Image (spheres, grey):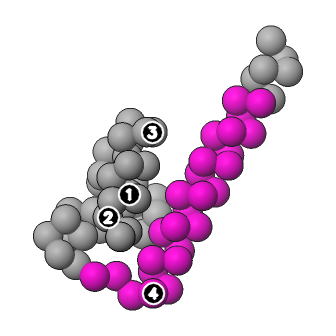
Amino acid sequence: MLIRSIEKFLRQHEMAATKFGRLAAHDPRFVLDLRLGREPRDGTEQRIRGFMAGFEAAQESCVREAAHVG
């Protein structure tokens, strides 16, 4: 379920739901609407999952680069 993945992502990255909505869906109410039962279209869900995967890959890349510098 998408909302569970998003909630986990928000906790892991200490990100506000509104910030996530703005970045991932261009809609600050996106997560709130999901919490209230909104069902995203398949394309939207894939885009959101892609955003989360890309964000985490970028975070890992930054951590690896920082380890090489220090």
**Could you say whether the residue bearing mark 1 is in a helix, strand or loop?**
helix
**Could you say whether the residue bearing mark 3 is in a helix, strand or loop?**
helix
Magenta-drawn segment: 39-64
Residues at marks 1 and 3 touching, judged by CB atoms closer than 8 Å: no
Task: Give how far apart the Cα atoms at labels 4 and 2 are.
Answer: 14 Å
Label 4 vs 2, first from the N-terminus: 2
Which corner quadrant of the image does residue 35 belong to?
bottom left
Label drawn at residue 3 = 2
Label drawn at residue 42 = 4
Left or right: 55 in relation to 2:
right
Magenta region includes residue 49:
yes
Magenta region includes residue 46:
yes
The x, y position of residue 16, in whole percent, is 32, 45
The x, y position of residue 41, in whole percent, is 39, 87
Q: Main secondary structure of the magenta part?
A: helix
**Could you say whether the residue bearing mark 2 is in a helix, strand or loop?**
helix
Q: Amino acid at mark 3?
A: His
The reply to whether residue 9 is in sight is yes
Residues at marks 4 and 3 touching, judged by CB atoms closer than 8 Å: no
Task: Work out which quarter of the rendered image holds the C terminus and state it.
Answer: top right
Q: Is disc 2 surrounded by few (<14), some (14 to 19) or many (20+) residues within 10 Å? A: some
- Point out the residue furthest to the front here: 1
Reading the image, the residue beneath label 3 is: 13
The x, y position of residue 1, in whole percent, is 35, 70
The x, y position of residue 63, in whole percent, is 70, 29
Q: Is 37 situated above or below 31?
A: below
Q: Amino acid at mark 4?
A: Asp
* Front position in the image: 7 or 58: 7
Task: Give how far apart the Cα atoms at labels 1 and 4 are.
Answer: 15 Å
Reading the image, the residue beneath label 1 is: 6
